[in-house]
Amino acid sequence: MARIPLKGSERKPLFGSRAVAPADPTERLEVSVLLRRHARPGLEDRVRKLTAGDRSSGHLAREDFARQFGAEAADIAAVKAFAAAHGLSVVQEHAARRTVVLSGTVAQFEAAFGVKLQHCEHPGGTYRGRTGSIQLPAELDGIVEAVLGLDNRPQAQPHFRMRAAPGTTDNSAAPVAFTPIQLATLYEFPSGTGQGQCVGIIELGGGFTPADLQTYFTRLKVGMPKVTAVSVDHGKNQPTGTANGPDGEVMLDIEVVGAIAPQANIAVYFAPNTDAGFLDAITTAIHDTTHKPTVISISWGGPESSWTPQAMTAMDDAFQAAATLGITVCAASGDNGSSDGVTDNSDHVDFPASSPYALACGGTSLQADQSSIGTEVVWNDGAQGGAGGGGVSSFFALPTWQADVRATGTDGVVTPLSKRGVPDVSGDADPGTGYDVRIDGTDTVIGGTSAVAPLWAGLLARINQINGQPVGYIHPQLYQNPQALRDITQGNNGDFSASVAWDACTGLGSPNGQKMAGIFAAAGTGGGVTKT
């Protein structure tokens, strides 16, 4: 049988890992197969208009999007026939998400996709891995765009930092902490509660306890938001009991969004920390016709170099779908400065923040009194701490709305961007000026760009409430209206320096919420849902 390598599916071993044995041939697993879109024209034109700042076409309803741009029945049937021929069963099929989930044994999947799966060890544990390309039968060439889940290595990290002990970082400023409500006041967020909105939060581990949430919001004197856990690929709300583990991420995200938008519904999509789980959580949130989030907050990610091209392309395509549906996707830019934690002495940016259809959220260090900001600089705790992620993508093309921006190096050299620049915006992320939160029964302080994504998500939930419709894909409007942000001009994140206007440390800057709301005043959004 003729086989064709699946473009972009090449895998390399996880850094520091080694294969110790073949994977158990009887082990059962589930694999997500992503299909091409329905061939109907129109989606590219909608995305092109949105990228140019043209909102005249409005946003599509989820049901209309599924009908026009989901997977074709014939393509789903072809994958099901392929599965049957290899003894694989179909666990789930979803036309809008263009996803078919298959179940079978290691031996069956190895035969079906021409791969060898290995049991691998690395400093953080073990995983089932593969190297090289996935092989498709000729009849699926062009139909299948990605096959995810054969390799279940941990794909992403949460981008939060616990406050370090005194004297362990280079930050000499006295530590302070803010509640999300105090930050909303300092950043001049418009009044609002997020009523009528839903914010989706992506989580790849950990969990929350309602008792902790009730205690936290009672202390803040705000109503307890409605929080719903949504299971994706068997992921569940499972608190580990360790504040410095994934519970820290989950609770931080919920508490920041819930404090700023207490009357918004919060849907938390729990999935395994794999490339398949991450993508499936995002597409589930985007096409969720029950909760219907208008803002999605993502505080997990990893260097672009750790992803396969097929996975990045698939997720970027999902974010384009979100744009046409009027959903804003906020993503943390990372906590390891211009290297993004890669030890090859080169610059790297974090994905999914580097997608041009995600609002990349960088980090600052904020000093303020009760009513106004004193100073705000790039978050960088020095060699022993963290720093806001940012730089230039090695994968995504330069968006039109970044055509005129420049990156300033710490050597003073100013360079036009060659590809997508990260981040777009920023907010307080320094653990030394961090967020008061409650995790696993303990009150603590957390920072990291993980806090900035839900901070922006809460702001946008308020603006959506005020407008009575979602703002959706906001990049063109932000870059056309930089005065709506507080420009950060001091500090660096390693190899890039802050500068006047956009920079590769803090983007356009931190928010002035009132001015942000003004950009998207209801009369000028043009972003209502259209029926076709």
Image (spheres, helix red, strand yellow):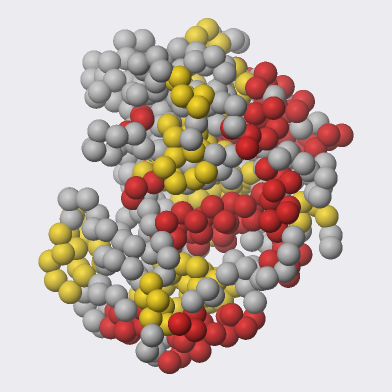
Q: Name the residue furthest left.
A: 20
Who's the residue at 72% across and 22% down the image?
515
Q: Position of residue 372 (x, y in %)?
A: 59, 10
* Along the line of sight, the residue nearer the viewer: 57 or 484: 57
Q: Name the residue furthest right.
A: 523
Residue 377 visible in the picture: no
Who's the residue at 56% across and 43% down the image?
356
Which image quarter: residue 357? top right
**Quadrant holding the C terminus:** bottom right
Which image quarter: residue 247? top left
Who's the residue at 50% across and 9% down the image?
375
Residue 289 visible in the picture: yes
Q: Position of residue 287 (x, y in %)?
A: 64, 61
Which image quarter: residue 431? top left
Above/below status of 132 relative to 346 = below
Q: Position of residue 92 (x, y in %)?
A: 53, 77
Above/below status of 402 relative to 226 = above
Q: Is residue 334 left or right of residue 463?
A: left
Q: Is residue 21 left or right of residue 426?
A: left
Q: Position of residue 23 (x, y in %)?
A: 21, 74
**Quadrant holding the N terminus:** bottom left
Who's the residue at 69% across and 50% down the image?
47
Above/below status of 366 relative to 420 = above
* Along the line of sight, the residue nearer the viewer: 358 or 157: 358
Q: Is residue 261 left or right of residue 465?
A: left
